[in-house]
Amino acid sequence: MTIAQDSPARSETSAAACSVTFSVNGRTSSLVLDPRVTLLDVLREHLHLTGTKKGCDQGQCGACTVMVNGRRINSCLTLALMHEGDEITTIEGLGSPEALHPLQKAFLDHDGFQCGYCTPGQIISAVAVLEEIGAGVPSHVTADLNGAPPATDEEIRERMSGNLCRCSAYPNIIAAIRDMVEDHV
Amino acid sequence: MRAFTYERAGSPAAAAAAVATQPGAKFIAGGTNLLDLMKLEIEVPTHLVDVNRLGLDLIETTPDGGLKIGALVRNTDLAADMRVRSDYPLLARAVLSGASGQLRNKATTGGNLLQRTRCPYFYNTDMPCNKRKPGSGCAAMGGLSHNLAIVGASDACIATHPSDMAVALRALDATVETVAADGSERHTPLADFYRSPGETPHIETVLRAAEMITSVTLPQPLGGVQIYRKVRERASFAFATVSVAMVAGSVDGDIRVDRLAFGGLAHKPWRVEAAEGAARSAEAIADIVLAGAKPTADNAYKLPLVRRTLAAVIAQAKSESAR
Amino acid sequence: MIGEGINRTDGPLKVTGGATYTADRQDAGAPLYGVIRGAGIGKGRITFIDTRAAEVAPGVQVVWTYRNAPAQAPARDYADLNDAHPQLVGDRVDHYGAPVAFVVANSFEEARAAAGLVEIGYDVASGAYELDQGVQPGAWHNVSAFGDVDKAMAEGPVTVEADYSTPYHFAQPMEPNACLASWHDGHLTVYLAAQMISQLIEGLAATLKLDQKHITVDSAFVGGGFGSKIALHAEAVLASLATMALHRPVKVLLTRRQIFTIVGHRAASHSRIRLAATPDGRLTAIGHDATVQTFRGGDWTEGVATVSRALYAAPNRLTRHARSELDLGTAEPVRGPGELPGLMVFESAIDELAEKLDMDPVELRLRNDTAVDPERKIPLSGRRLADCLREGAKRFGWDNRPAVPGSRRDGRWLIGYGVASSIRGHFQSAAEVSVRLLPEGRVVVTSDMTDLGTGTYTIVAQVAAAALGVPVSQVTVELASTDHPSSMGSGGSWGAANTSVATDRACQSLRDQIAAVAGTGYNDLFAELRRHFPRGLEATGKTLESRDDPNYRRYSQFTYGASFAEVGVDADTGEVRLRRMLGVFSAGRILNAKTARSQLIGGMTWGVSAALHEGSYPDPRHGNWPKGDLAEYLLPVHADIPDIEAIMLDDFDEHANHLGVKGIGELGAGGTGGSVANAVYNATGVRVRDFPITIANLLPGLAARG
């Protein structure tokens, strides 16, 4: 049997570059981009903000989580061009080794990571999770849809489930976030 | 991902017109499914019309007491809306059981309805797939099919629809509003929105070329006990093995299943109206729902799973209505 | 200082996004991007290739197939890590997804699109993809036999004979396999996601036919490995060839889907386990026949049946492996090689025996404890399995285990407890570490050892600081460059012991040298250094291969553990959820209580995952992997993992080395899966012998019980 692979005959034309302006961690960037460039790849390959990681490039691991206008999203599943005027926050915008964000400090103290690759995504996600709970956004495990969700471990685990950790620092990550609960929720 | 050109649309009709005039054009909203498929070249649009800034992100009360949900309302906002939470808890629960927090923040109401199947053979571009490449065959039949359809499938396709939200909307009798390139609008009950796979599983909905979803409307709240039960292999962030959306009322201390739809079973949210209304046992309901089921060896376990899950949900409804 | 649970020294970089993994490195300047195209068939020949569209696509620098790829050294069958691993060398496709084309372009987007433009046709051959298809009857490998198991089984009186299966596992660290290669002035610098770079550089040099001295491999930060970054894979070879051809840095990341095909996997296994015991629970026979997949021409045999060899006493013993050579990708070590699937099934069988004996499963294990290696007949060093079992039972509240399977309920959940033993061989390998004292008051430790998240940077700093009497903050640890002294890297749970022992020896040598001129009573190390060695001082420390170390001939060396799990099983749907878990481990002296606990918890989670979540099989017709991404191949998420307790016994194994240190990387995984499986049985009365315990696998039994 001879089969051809599933790739129709075709040729490629140059992608017309488009311009976009957004701010990352408070700094405005104006870029001219191939429309195919994802937000993740523009951060990493164009702006060299490599703290945001490419884990699966298909929205299944959460390593690329960033905040856009205060909401966490998978930066791998959105085009850079779709973010005209947006305010983007990456792990580099939270704190530095000399001035850690309280959650970064909590991750450090609770050993909420091993290899560290999923960690920026976990931390960004955790910051957003605390804000979501504080804002009363319900989750799958919220017992009373009409009440304010409690900041329990169960709630945090459910909400953090879009961030995979193969080293499985999960219990330590939850411990780190738990530390922050009183301050933020 | 093939090269494409990009524009931001100025209005819904203009967006539809832009897609209509450019061969190979597609709308992009949340992008959480489309971009994944474009990376794998399962979708190969030559032009993307970004509809994210069209508004369409409001949830409004309709004159007849229902709810009109803009097509660009993000999943998170839909589930967090107090009216949805109190009057349509089934919908809030279904949305919250799907995907992850990050994805729900981006994914839209319209896009959720249009997400493509997660059949592994659809995703594997080296394999035959009638949905991806019409006429190429179905590798899932005779392949690994643990999570594929047991009812409503065809000889051409045994894929399932992955949405949780759509299952709830189907149970709630939602209507889909669309706009065409010429500005004309139409309203399609969700019951008629999805097509059965038949010989053309690549055509999944009744949407016409360049027709854009603008909103989804819910009729008046149903009340009753509303339960969305999602069975899955891990506790979160997994597609349903089987899901059950139920609205139940209490009649003389017994439970009457008023609305019932299933996810994970079929090419579309699976609702068999004949199973609803009368007071029946879980077994009798399941017999109706599963009539004509054709499982594979891999997914035959879904038959007892549907029955047991349904019985459990009915028991839960009973205990909740007694409260 | 040694043992103290200090925070990771590289932690501040990791929590701020400043740790630069391979694909993050900017050192080489702006790179070109390479994308690999994998074969679309499981077995056959390429009959047609058209690269014209790809070659003229925007930004494309080069399109390689077997027809025009640069010359490389030939491959040999059963190649070792340090042998050549050439890419794109012929028209033969030997497994699904094997690289068949490689595109380098100016941007990632251009390279990815052009890779899709390569047209490839195949002549498809029928392949062997199912585990029973590639076995040569009667050909046993890795056999260990004592006494007569058949006879003991016939004599009984209490026996268990059961078949188990485990699926293919994929390591899937969060960092994809990646390489950034840069050829500059005749020197090849390879930033690579890798575990054992001293082996890899040899394989790479052999492949490229380049003298090793013209290559540097640098893996300063590695985003998890779990075995998948031991072997030399296509991304390293192709990125290296491309930078040498194009004289620009070239970056190649495997896609997540490609990690399922280009990187190897843990072999699936089928086990027949036979146990015979006296009525009072003394094992008289242990039999374990395991069939495991191997790659045609591959050398790795998953040691599924080896796990019982030093676990319990029994006079009659037969453990052996059949290799099934299939047309799948390479079987490679994945975390807990042998023992993760092996202990999961073997400890399930022990649970079945306890049930038959009507004996507490902890008691059964205690009754078959042994101080002597039952097969090597030499003392087991640091044998504390019984301590782990007893301590764990006490802390877990094992007394409260439901006595009758399927008897306890919490709402819709059926509740069960399970226990399993863990054991993992301890190995020592040759390693060298250099320690320099700088007059300005710093200690610099260098080694090619990697830190996969294992904590190497931190524990090495602690060991050096303790040995030299300086604070950890004064120690700089530089790892994972082949310019540093060589070790066996990270793999096999030997990295921490090798590196810490060699570091300590180097430090002792420095102290001796200073004491030789300053006397032993000095107060300030660096003052004496500046006085006597104004330009600083350097020393190296070494470890020996196990076979060269008399302690490893006199003592049989293992680490031990016991894990206890409580699960809930949804009585209607068969969904299994872990409720709590506790592990007690004996692994010699612990170097950092915090990082060690984390690593053990991580390993335990692997056990949970193997029992409940992960696993894959190829399509039996096409040889591809239908579960090709992380939405199909399920790993546990936060919601699946409750608090897990990992207890480390206060321990010191003087026969392992002078620091008393062993390894923990694989141990946590060990028998954990078995404890979960046994808990599922205790909860439901249903024994699932095919892993993982999915709804599909559990529900029929559950439904049969009503």
Image (tube, grey):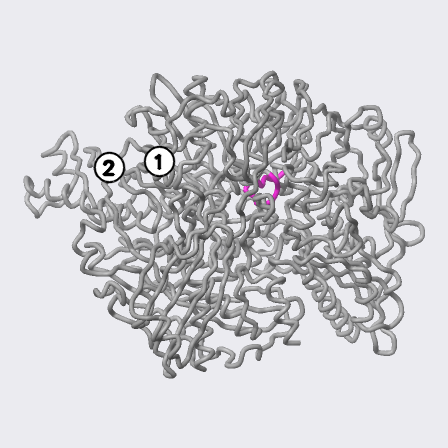
Question: Split into 4 quadrants, where in the image is the C terminus of chain A?
Answer: bottom right
Q: State the residue in front, C643 or B99.
A: B99
Instruction: Where is residue C701? Give x, y as percent.
Output: 61, 71
Contact? badges 1 and 2 (CB < 8 Å)? no
SS for dot 1? helix
Residue C429 seen:
yes
SS for dot 2? strand
The chain holding disc 2 is: C
Looking at the rendered structure, which numbered label has been put on residue C210? none
Q: Is residue C69 above or below residue C273?
A: above
Report if residue A60 lies within the magenta region. Answer: yes
Q: State the residue in front, B28 or B153.
A: B153
Residue receiving disc 1: C200
Q: State the residue in front, C97 or B39.
A: C97
Q: Residue at x 84, y 46 (%)?
A: B195
Q: Residue at x 60, y 46 (%)?
A: C621
Q: Magenta-highlighted stretch: main secondary structure?
A: loop
| Identity, as a three-letter code, of the amino acid under mark 1 | Leu
Toward which corner of the image does residue C368 lie, by quadrant? bottom left
The chain holding disc 1 is: C
| Identity, as a three-letter code, of the amino acid under mark 2 | Arg
Instruction: Where is residue B59? Give x, y as percent.
Output: 82, 46
Left or right: C318 in relation to C68: left
Magenta-colored span: A58-68
Q: Is residue C705 above or below residue C227?
A: below
Question: Split into 4 quadrants, where in the image is the N terminus of chain A?
Answer: top right
Residue receiving disc 2: C442
**Which numbered disc, 1 or 2, marks the residue that appears first in the sequence?**
1
Q: Residue at x 5, y 44 (%)?
A: C519
